[in-house]
Image (cartoon, rainbow, N blue to C red):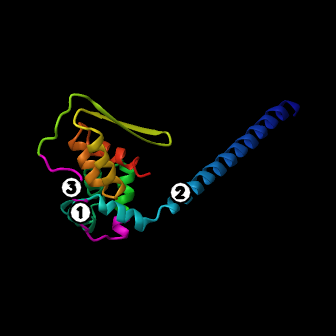
Amino acid sequence: MSSLLVPVLILAAVVVGVLLVSRILSRRSAELRGTDATDKAAVDPAELAREAAAKLSEDQHRQLYSLIAQGQAMAAIKLYLSATGEGLRASRDAVGALASHPQPFRKPEAAPQGLIPDDDEPERFPYRYRAIASKGDVTREVSSNMLNDEIYGRIRTLAKSGDVEAAALALTKHSDISMKQAREFIELLDD
């Protein structure tokens, strides 16, 4: 009888330990789910839909809503991802917001005239100009021999006036960066 007592006590201790660990892990996962829910609740889906629609051209907007109407969510997410260059999760959230809060296409407001000349080929300078933008821990740098203080000032003015797309387009025209990189740079200039 005493030979069975020790294994039974060990088994009981293991069962109690497993139950405690299971309970602790379930509480932690519930806490994490609770913080995720509050983070998602902080983002207004209607505002997200307005911002997402503003990033699309008229043709992309029409194609995206056509895919949503046909129930092709994955194709709509893929279209949004390729059109904006955002990540998969951001694209999924944006398409979901656009589906639940339909947005009409709005043409972007015209940029103030004369800020960036419409020359076909930008002038190349004998030096490389470095433009640096940072916010918090994020820093972006653009180095180009097609930029100078005057052109960079015009790009900053466009960004501060709210015409992010025109500013990003001008930055890509006067440097060798992609549109996605230019948008990331311009977003750091909003202060």
Which is in the foreground here, disc 1 or disc 2? 1
Using the image as rendered, state which of residue 36 and residue 118 is in the foreground: 118
Residue depicted at x 25% and y 38%: 147
Q: Give the residue pinned by disc 3.
A: 114
Residue depicted at x 33% and y 49%: 156
Per the rendering, the mark at residue 110 is 1
Q: Position of residue 116 (x, y in %)?
A: 22, 50
Using the image as rendered, state which of residue 77 and residue 142 is in the foreground: 142
Q: Secondary structure at mark 3?
A: loop
Label 1, label 3: how far apart the Cα atoms are: 11 Å
Above or below: residue 96 compared with residue 16 = below
Per the rendering, the mark at residue 39 is 2
Which is in the foreground here, disc 1 or disc 3? 3
Q: Position of residue 88 (x, y in %)?
A: 36, 49
Magenta stretch, residue numbers: 97-119
Which image quarter: residue 99? Answer: bottom left
* Precedes in sequence: disc 1 or disc 2: 2
**Total numbered circles:** 3
Q: Position of residue 134 (x, y in %)?
A: 44, 41
Q: Are marks 1 and 3 in contact (CB under 8 Å)?
A: no
Residue depicted at x 63% and y 53%: 31
| Type of secondary structure dominating the magenta stretch | loop
